[in-house]
Amino acid sequence: MTAALSALVLFGVQAPASAAEDTPVVSRGITIPTFYNPPTSLPSANGALIRSEPLTLGLSLPGLSGPLPGTATRMMYKSTDSNGQPVAVTGAYIEPAARWTGSGPRPLVVLAPGTMGQGDQCAASLALENALALNLTEGTVSVGYENLATYRLLAKGIAVAVTDYVGLGATDRLHTYVNRVDEGHAVLDAVRATRSLTGTSVTASSPVGLYGYSQGGGATASAAELQPTYAPDVTLAGVYAGAPPADLVKVLPGIDGSALAAAAGWTVNGLAQAKPALQPIIDSYINDAGRAALADVSTMCVGDGILGYPFAKTKSWTKQGISLGDVIAREPAVKAAVDAQRIGRIKPSTPVRVATGVADDTVPHGQARQLAVDWCAKGANVTYEPIYLPNLGDKIVLTNHFLPLIEDQGSAIGWLTDRLEGRRAYSNCWKLPLML
């Protein structure tokens, strides 16, 4: 057992054990295909393809030139985690049936999923195969809500790669939820892995875009910042970062007490997976109820979290009766680890579109807007779009946070398509002081 896994077990989180490649892992009653078990040794190159296999899309129709909306491939590829160590990441690629009508080669968009959960059964690539996965006995429900954006991109003739991130799907470790380096690397390496697949229309000259909302918005924002140094071979045409959790110090109070309070547990679990030295500090605060909650949420999907811990207050998880946000403020080492996840300190070299619902109180609007402010101050090409919807209920998630995703999706895909077609993006940083 690795040090990171030991750390999680010590404060009650049963992190996934390393499984033999041919031994299925079961998460909350759902069997994870053995494809998702990483090998014991990994390639040296970032983005190197480890394995691939055909993937049957759960929503598909027969067409004259093949299945609609396209032909899918499951893939596993090598990336590098935030500790500089090799890691296997899973995902999927979909070759669209629709023809690309723009100029030049068919473009590629890497879709970084929004929050799916922390159990391996929640992986976005599995959701492409089964848009709704249920096990009522064990209490889990996974909904492939990101499939809508994937299919809208495919309908435009845009090839799509979906990443599962580090530890979501791949069974050797816990998902490092909202770890900006792990997520940014996983997104960029998905481009490299896709280029090495056989039988696709994606080439080295294909324009590349990134699309993400919520957790996915943080992942694409991080990838935009990390690309020049981590993946200079991956030229980006444009990046959409919707409702990005750019400042976790501001995001945790928004999640705490919300319908998706389980995400606070995913954040703590992910921190301990990436930084096991934090375990003794965290353990000194977490009470028995907190231990049980952290262990429980570590195998949950979004639906499970909403049903299992709606509007939970994290102060009930600590011995001192203080929130997890207060724990961070008290402990310099934990505060430094959380601060290291801050996005907005590096200038992206590609046009970026930041959108956020002005009434969003789960991934708070203010900190997402601040990301645009920070990038603008560095001279980045930023298109900032506030989404004006009424407050439909404090901390309900499905209203103030999820509805802006639906409201903005068409505009976001349209903006990204323009970048893939070579149209210039005009920054509206000059207008930002006039907008909420």
Image (cartoon, helix red, strand yellow):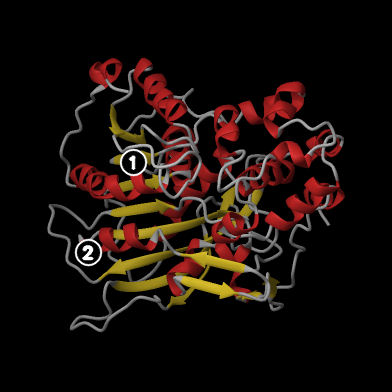
Question: Where does the image place residue 300, in percent across and percent down from the top left?
Answer: 64, 60
Question: Where does the image place residue 170, in percent across and percent down from the top left?
Answer: 62, 62
Question: Where does the image place residue 357, in percent across and percent down from the top left?
Answer: 36, 36
Please state if 183 lies on the left or on the right of 373 as rendered. Answer: right
Q: Which mark is residue 240?
A: 1
Question: Where does the image place residue 172, in percent across and percent down from the top left?
Answer: 70, 61
Label 2 neighbour load within 10 Å: few <14, some 14-19, many 20+ = some
Identify the residue shown where x is 22% and y is 45%: 411
Which is nearer the N-term, disc 2 or disc 1? 2
| Front-lying residue, 102 or 278 | 278
Identify the residue shown where x is 38% and y is 29%: 348
Identify the residue shown where x is 50% and y is 29%: 343
Q: CA distance from mark 2 to mark 1?
A: 18 Å
Residue 43 shows up from this direction: no
What residue occupies the far front of the structure in this picture?
A: 393
- Residue at disc 1, secondary structure: strand
Please state if 415 lies on the left or on the right of 402 as rendered. Answer: left
Query: Which amino acid lies under the numbered mark 1 shown in the image of this protein?
Result: Tyr
| Front-lying residue, 149 or 329 | 329
Residue 84 placement: quadrant = top right
Query: Which amino acid lies under the numbered mark 2 shown in the image of this protein?
Result: Ala
From what the image shows, is residue 357 above or below residue 344? below
Label 1 neighbour load within 10 Å: few <14, some 14-19, many 20+ = many
Residue 211 shows up from this direction: yes
From what the image shows, is residue 348 above or below residue 223? above
Q: Indicate the quadrant containing the N terminus: top left, top right, bottom left or bottom right.
A: bottom right
Read off the residue under disc 2: 155
Identify the residue shown where x is 58% and y is 60%: 301
- Residue at disc 2, secondary structure: helix
